[in-house]
Image (cartoon, grey):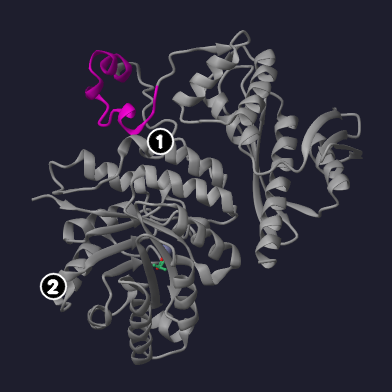
Amino acid sequence: MARKVYIFDTTMRDGEQTAGVTLTFNEKLELARQLANLNVDVIEAGFPFSSPGDFKAVEAIAEQIKGPIICALARALPQDIDRAYEALRKAEKPRIHTFISTSDIQIKHQLRKTREEVLEMAVSAVKRAKSYVTDVEFSAMDATRSDWDFLCTIFEAAIKAGATVINIPDTVGYTLPSEFYELVKYVIENTKGIDDVIVSVHCHNDLGLATANSLAAIEAGATQVECTVNGIGERAGNAALEEVVMIIDTRKDRIDAFTDINISEIARTSKLVSRLTGVYVQPNKAIVGENAFAHQSGIHQDAVLKERTTFEIIDPKKIGFIESKIVLGKLSGRHALKTRLEELGYFLNEEDLNKAFQRFKELADRKKEITDRDLEAIVSADVKVPSEHFKLSYIQVTTGNRVIPTATVALEKNGQSFISSSTGDGPVDAAYRAIDNITGFKCRLQNFSVQAVTSGQDALGEVQVQLDIEGISVTGRGISTDIVESSVRAYVNAINRYLTIIKQAEEQDNG
Ligand code: KIV
Ligand code: ZN
């Protein structure tokens, strides 16, 4: 009989460890709601001991999100476990996930301990967690570079101490599918008590093998896969949820397993994660990339038109990519906009709909046809921004190859108008300096990228920036048919995100 594979989503924990990604409190709640719609089995909501912000987010998710198990990460230390439990107290189904390194290289150089000490710490951590909750996961960090017999010993001890899930992470993304298959099988065959617990795997993508390794583990008997939406995560990321789920679904002829994921929510979740984290999905990314269902070759196009399955192994509609039936333009009204946004999964309140409509009209004056991608960009970058502290009123630039680039920027905040001018190395640099004069922040531009959201001469350009503001890394996105304007909107968006994060930290400090 087909086996259920539990999907453990760690987008909010390991995914948030992606360089430059910081989610605000509200963004984490929005994402948790969508993960519940996607029907993941477990949401790893954060690492409560690591920061007050993480604690608050886990606490709120535990209280508000019903359905999935809500999990909190803790090192194998009493203070971490206590904090994890405090955050999870109100969860309907809480899980504490505790971990410790088990490879000799990490035991010696990172922990400066012995295997015996690690074993003892693991057992007392599991026992402490078990005194709080019934569901306890134990992870042997760097399992794939650990001694296999030591792994079995520590897992056996963790199970005896009360662990309900044992996790085998490929922390540094080092293993190969055939090798991981053998390791998982070895652990299953040589660990007493393992039949009564869930066997989980957690694969990183340093060699591009995270999904393949997760699949090999399922074939060897693993029953839980830890993964992130769009494969984001520490360094090269984690196994991509959508890939693992769609492989199991598409190849059920070979893989005797299923998941309970609501597959039609995959596209929407992927877009949400990309919007909230500011991490683009590469166009050729399997399942959710822009080109994943685009047929370029004439022969393929012809065949797909005759019979879709000739060159398409997944129906894009099945994972929630919908085709537009209405073409929006200058003459479209609020109702048409609202209807289309709702078809795309954006249910805006009155105020946000007004903002979206205003931006839509501005854009429709400059662009003949407004596509779904344009609408998504409007909602992502201009409507659903965290509490708008600074608003762009106008920008004017003078540039050319024989003049010093100069920009004048006007911003609005709390009904007050601020204006500043500056010169710079180029028009964007000049505008950024003018904004810095207004905000008084020292922003260091760490990353700047531009991409066309839609094609054609009147295409929208989307700019993404990563700024370091007073030691905090934030991303921002902006769109417009004018690249300088997109750049300014992205910069202002990043500053607003910074202000939201600071405000939340202050609120948390004040209790
Ligand atoms: O990669 C890893 O080993 C982890 C553990 C905390 C499970 O993220
Ligand atoms: Zn990890």
Q: In the image, what residue type sits under mark 1?
A: Ala
Task: Say which amino acid is labelled 2.
Answer: Glu
Q: Quadrant of residue 131?
A: bottom left
Tell me if residue 102 can be seen.
no
Magenta stretch: residue 310 in it?
yes
Mark 1: secondary structure: helix
Q: Which mark is residue 267?
A: 1
Main secondary structure found in the magenta portion: helix
Residue 433 in view (yes/no)? yes
Residue 17 is left or right of residue 471, and the answer is left
Q: Is residue 478 above or below residue 6?
A: above
Q: With respect to residue 73, does 77 lie above or below?
A: below
Secondary element at tag 2? helix
User: Which of the numbered marks, if any, corresponds to residue 39?
Assistant: none
Disc 2 packing (10 Å; few <14; some 14–19; many ≥20):
few
Q: Which mark is residue 189?
A: 2
Rendered position, 173 above or below 400: below
Q: Which residues are magenta?
A: 300-322
Quarter of the image where one finds residue 303 = top left
